Amino acid sequence: LATIDTYRQLSRSLRRHKASHKGTHGHLLILAGSPGKTGAAMLSAKGALRTGAGLVSLCVPNNFNSIYETSLIEAMTIPLPGSFDILSIEDWESISRATVGKQVVVIGPGIGRDRRTAELVIRAYEEIKCPVIFDADALNIIADYRNDLHSPGGTRVFTPHPGELARLLQKEVADIQDNRIDAALLGSSLFRNDVHETILVLKGAGTIIANGEGTTFINTTGNPGMATGGMGDVLTGVIGALICQGISPMNAAVAGVFLHGSAADLLYDECGVGFSASEVADMIPGAAKKHLLDS
């Protein structure tokens, strides 16, 4: 359940001043996509745009730039010259420059686990100064290199499903599901840093948000219709967009999970199961209006 502080931050962010413009609502950078998984990047961008991010840019493999250019007409793309099919460490300098002026970075949806991509993820974990949201294969890469990580460069948000958290903690999925709160707390404390906050979002029925300080929230929205591909990609964009708009990373995680589930609940009430992740993204504005702007 969200705290009063979370509600106030979210409500204040979404009740915009009449003179606001795209530059006053943050700029999100997304590193995502690989062969067969370009949709993951698009869903993350759509989730961010539907949640009100002022600007969204994507660093994308060069060979797929035309796909993103024609499919994401509201977002901007940064084709990476050394990343032909996958995101590669060869483009670190270009990516590092792209982070300048961004409020948050999303990395992981659909990126795969190639060695060159893994090196990029580890360097992003250690060096990017703004908050970074790690999802999907970025989490699997961190699990593979867990013992080699140095201190993070800034606040880090992890958004694992039970299988990904099991890999991070080197446990069985059943152990995670049998003790979800303890597992989320352990995951956040494992990567806890004395300088920068670590937040973990354990997805699933009753999504749990935890930080390394021992604080936990249990989400009450969402439904079985969300059991389909792409939902997590949308969620990363939602959380990233809220951070862009000035909400603290912990409150953005709590509010983002709530809004994401609320949007899906609107669809479930209307049509039952069978809705898609992109449809959930499209319902985010309606969910925000229902819970915040009309209240």
Image (spheres, rainbow, N blue to C red):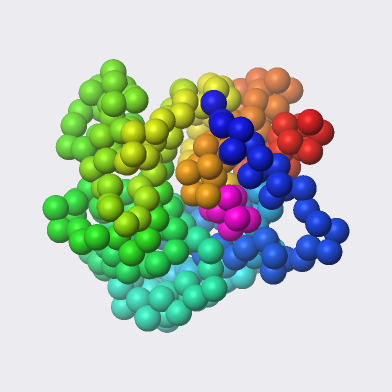
Residue drawn at x 70%, y 20% is 269
Left or right: where does residue 51 sit relative to residue 133? Answer: right
Give the x, y percent position of residue 95: 42, 74
Q: Nearer the viewer, residue 139 or 126?
A: 126
Residue 215 visible in the picture:
yes
Looking at the image, residue 251 lies above or below residue 215: below
Decide: is 264 above or below 102: above
Q: Position of residue 272 (x, y in %)?
A: 65, 20
Which residue is drawn at the image coordinates 39% and 33% (left, top)? 215
Extreme residue toward the left, this view: 147
Q: Is residue 268 left or right of residue 137?
A: right
From the viewer's perspective, is 101 left or right of 159?
right
Q: Quadrant of the C terminus?
A: top right
* Residue 2 versus residue 137 in the image, above or below: above
Main SS of the magenta part reads: helix
Residue appearing at x 58%, y 50% in the figure: 247
The image quarter containing residue 173 is: top left
Residue 68 forms part of the magenta stretch: no
In the foreground, 255 or 74: 255
> For the N terminus, which image quadrant?
top right
Residue 258: x and y in percent read 58, 33
Q: Position of residue 8 (x, y in %)?
A: 66, 40
Q: Residue at x 60, y 55 (%)?
A: 246
Residue 259 located left or right of residue 147: right
Q: Which residues are magenta?
A: 240-247
Image: 163 above or below 158? above
Q: Is residue 160 visible?
A: no
